[in-house]
Image (cartoon, rainbow, N blue to C red):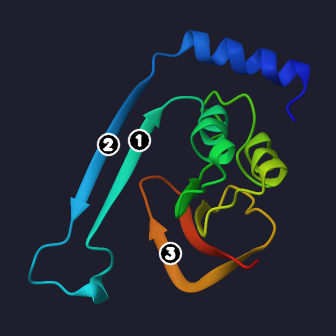
């Protein structure tokens, strides 16, 4: 559970940042088979508090997302980190709500009980890489 100081920082962060929600639904075209992944999937992009959102949308319902991206930003203004032993990890532990996969940036510590999927990485703008991990429990 976050400390009193962390909760205060969270409240201040939420009050000073405008929020939005974008939902993208992707659908595979007919010329591709199941070998190319899901027929349809959605991606939700929120400008919201990541820790509180994970708790409200996933953890409280005990229904984890299939994939979670963990990216700690040194100058991103976050009041706590998302990686190992951060507030987001503590919410997942307290509610036993873990995604099957995590795409974790190399500047972020992966949560316990995740194994790196070999030969799978994602490059993105900037100097960091993201690596795919699978939950092993």
Distance, label 3 to label 1, CA atoms, is: 21 Å
Relative horizontal placement of residue 96, taking residue 15 as reference (left or right) = right
Q: Secondary structure at mark 3?
A: strand
Check disc 1 and report the residue beneath it.
45
Q: Name the quadrant of the N terminus.
A: top right
Residue closest to the far front: 61
Q: Residue at the spot x=59%, y=35% of the render? A: 53
User: What is the total number of numbered labels drawn onto the structure image?
Assistant: 3
Residue closest to the far left: 31
Q: Residue at the spot x=51%, y=81% of the render? A: 120
Please tell me whether residue 31 is drawn above or below residue 18 in the rendered image: below
**Relative image position of residue 26 (x, y in whole percent):** 24, 60
Q: Secondary structure at mark 2?
A: strand
Distance, label 2 to label 1, CA atoms, is: 6 Å
**Relative image position of residue 121 (x, y in whole percent):** 50, 75
Question: Mark 1 and mark 2 in contact (Cβ < 8 Å)?
Answer: yes
Check disc 2 and report the residue beneath it.
23
Please tell me whether residue 64 is drawn above or below residue 45 in the rendered image: below
Q: Residue at the spot x=68%, y=12% of the render? A: 12
Label 3 vs label 1, nearer the camera: 1
Answer few, some or many: residues within 10 Å of disc 3's Cα (few below 14, many 20 plus, some between 14 and 19): some
Relative horizontal placement of residue 92, taking residue 1 as reference (left or right) = left
Check disc 3 and report the residue beneath it.
121
Relative horizontal placement of residue 121, taking residue 107 as reference (left or right) = left
Q: Quadrant of residue 128?
A: bottom right
């Amino acid at each position: 559970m976050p400390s009193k100081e962390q909760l205060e920082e969270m409240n201040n962060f939420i009050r000073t940042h405008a929020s939005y929600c974008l939902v993208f639904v992707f659908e595979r075209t007919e010329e591709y088979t199941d070998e190319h992944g899901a027929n349809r999937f959605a991606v939700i992009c929120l400008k919201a508090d990541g820790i509180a959102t994970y708790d409200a949308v996933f953890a409280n319902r005990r229904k984890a997302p299939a994939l979670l991206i963990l990216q700690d930003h040194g100058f991103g203004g976050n009041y706590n980190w998302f990686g190992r032993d951060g507030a987001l990890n503590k919410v997942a532990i307290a509610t036993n709500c873990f995604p099957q996969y995590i795409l974790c940036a190399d500047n972020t510590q992966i949560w316990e009980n995740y194994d790196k999927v070999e030969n799978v990485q994602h490059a993105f703008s900037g100097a960091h890489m993201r690596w795919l991990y699978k939950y092993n429990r």
